[in-house]
Image (spheres, rainbow, N blue to C red):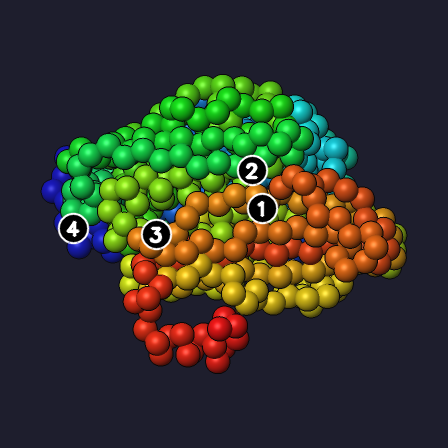
Amino acid sequence: MPQIDQVEVEVLSNHLISIVHEMGAILRRTSYSPNIREREDCSCVLADTTGQIIAQAEHIPGHLGMLTVGIPYLLKHFPPNTLNEGDVFMFNTPEGGSHLPDIRIVVPIYHDGELVGLSANLAHHADVGGMVPGSMPSKSTEIWQEGLILPPLKLYSKGVLNKPVMDILMYNVRTPTEREGDLNAQIAAAQLGQRRVQEVIQKSGLSYWKTYTEGILDYSERLMRAKIRERFPDGKYYSELFIDDDGMDDERIKIAVTVTVKDDSVKVDYSGTDKQRASGVNCILANCVSAAYFVVKAVADPTIPVNSGCYRPIEVYCPEGTIISPDPTAAIGAGNETWQRIAETLVGAVLQADPSIVKAHSHGCMNNTVFGGTDPRTGKVYTYYETIGGGDGARALADGMDGVHVMGTNTMNTPVEVVEMYYPLTIEEYSLRRDTGGVGKHRGGLGIKRKYRVEGHTSTLTANSDWIKQKPDGTEGGGRGAMTRLVINEGTDKEVIPGFCKVMQKLQHGETFTVYSGGGNGYGDPADRDQTLVERDLLDDKISS
């Protein structure tokens, strides 16, 4: 192998990272749906010809393992020798790395007729059909109820649109204009990545490209191994946490993990996790992988370049038939919340190893919220999808952040003005919840109150949440943050507090749905809190006393 110049490795690595960030900017700015344009629910990558990720923008942590799994999965269906210039591939199968709303687009990159890489992205579409608007039902019992399943397909072949494939998708979704616009944005972003890589090779040569992309992977692996050795004490650490229920049965569901650290490697074993359920609470194998990658990398060193190299020291085992690795026919519509519980369970294991290197538990869920119906202003069908943040856990040196998305999701909120402009919904209140952060030397972050009112029509609500019934304690003597609450028609004679953390219900004109997201847990003895911080919190109305 040619001699590697580490300066060149760093230069190319950062160049490729800038390309995937540019891809993300193009995807967001040209998409139709607020979920992608405003909330930025998407991720972009570049890969080599074997499917190894060589650059990924730090968009959504939950996507870390999805494209790592997804691109090799595509290449099994379409080996490199079957690809052509001008092809665009599309798929959304769970085996390919995510739930059905996450459509993946992959474009092969050629230089002088030779395949040199792949440009890809993933974006959450607000609807892909199925039994409810938004395609994320908690009470589905099989995958076919959740939407259209797209195996790897050529959406474009040698630059020509495969119109029947596009038609199949458009005829099976509730919002075809928005879906087509978002797909075109994904294609444009992937083709931008294609052009940028071709420019790199045109300038520096194909030999340089092959040598230094492999050098980037090796460099990230060395960094990760060094940081694991430095940050994680050797040993075996066990943690278990629980999901409140599956939306149909009140029984808690256990997520178990054993993290084994030996020298410069980490093994994550989910043995002991409960069996799959007959509801949408199941999640897929790629979620286990991405959660492990996210937590280990975040603790080891968040600045290590995100690519397949930094994952080489991490081994993941997910027993089949469990809630986190179900059979291919299993329902997974509410599995996003299970991803959160997997990540929080991993945090619990790291807390066993050394509480100083990780944060206390957060509010612990995404609060997936979906409304869908016919907009009375236009007569057109709409689907609105959003996740709602909450309090992050406190750390050894700082308070938890207030009202943020945590763990698997790194999305923005949808601005109130955008919600009310595009959808027949009114946001009655959007505020931080006072007194919801767990007490401690460092306070947990505050939760959020977000109250929706339906206007002039009947809307189908799907809400997937968790930790409304139970939650782990704080860290090193810190207090537990407030739990999440869901309320329908709050303050009226029709008020209902759902008994399950997963809700599917129709709401009429004037009816409301309120999410009170939980607070983050505290860290350290509350008696040790700096009095000036207490006074600041009082002035900011974050605490009442």
Tell me the CA gap for discs 1 and 4: 50 Å
Q: Which residue is mark 2?
A: 244
Which part of the image, by quadrant, shows the N terminus? top left
x, y (%) of residue 127? 69, 42
Residue 216 percent coordinates (x, y):
25, 44
**Residue in the picture at 20% in, 34% down:** 235
Disc 1 element: loop
Mark 1 Cα within 10 Å, few/some/many (few <14, many 20+)?
Answer: many
Callout 2 amino acid: Asp
Residue for badge 1: 468
Q: CA distance from mark 1 to mark 2?
A: 7 Å
Question: Of callouts 1 and 2, which one flags the residue occurring earlier in the amino acid sequence?
Answer: 2
Above/below status of 446 relative to 266: below
State the image coordinates of residue 391 (x, y, percent, origin top left): 48, 58
Give the mark, 4 or 2, whose residue is nearer the N terminus. 4
Crowding at dot 4, Cα within 10 Å, few <14 / some 14-19 / many 20+, comes out as few
The quarter holding residue 278 reads: top right
Q: CA distance from mark 3 to mark 4?
A: 41 Å
Graded by Cα atoms within 10 Å as few (under 14), some (14 to 19) or many (20 or more), the crowding at tag 3 reads: many
Q: Which residue is mark 3?
A: 475
Residue at mark 4 to residue at mark 2: CA–CA distance: 49 Å
* Three-letter amino acid code at the position of disc 4: Gln
Q: Nearer the viewer, mark 4 or mark 2?
A: 2
Tag 1–tag 2 contact (CB < 8 Å):
yes
Residue 206: % across, % down:
28, 41
Query: Is 49 situated above or below 446?
Result: above
**Residue that label 4 marks:** 6
Report if residue 277 is visible in the image: yes
Amino acid carrying label 1: it is Ile
Q: Element under label 2?
A: loop
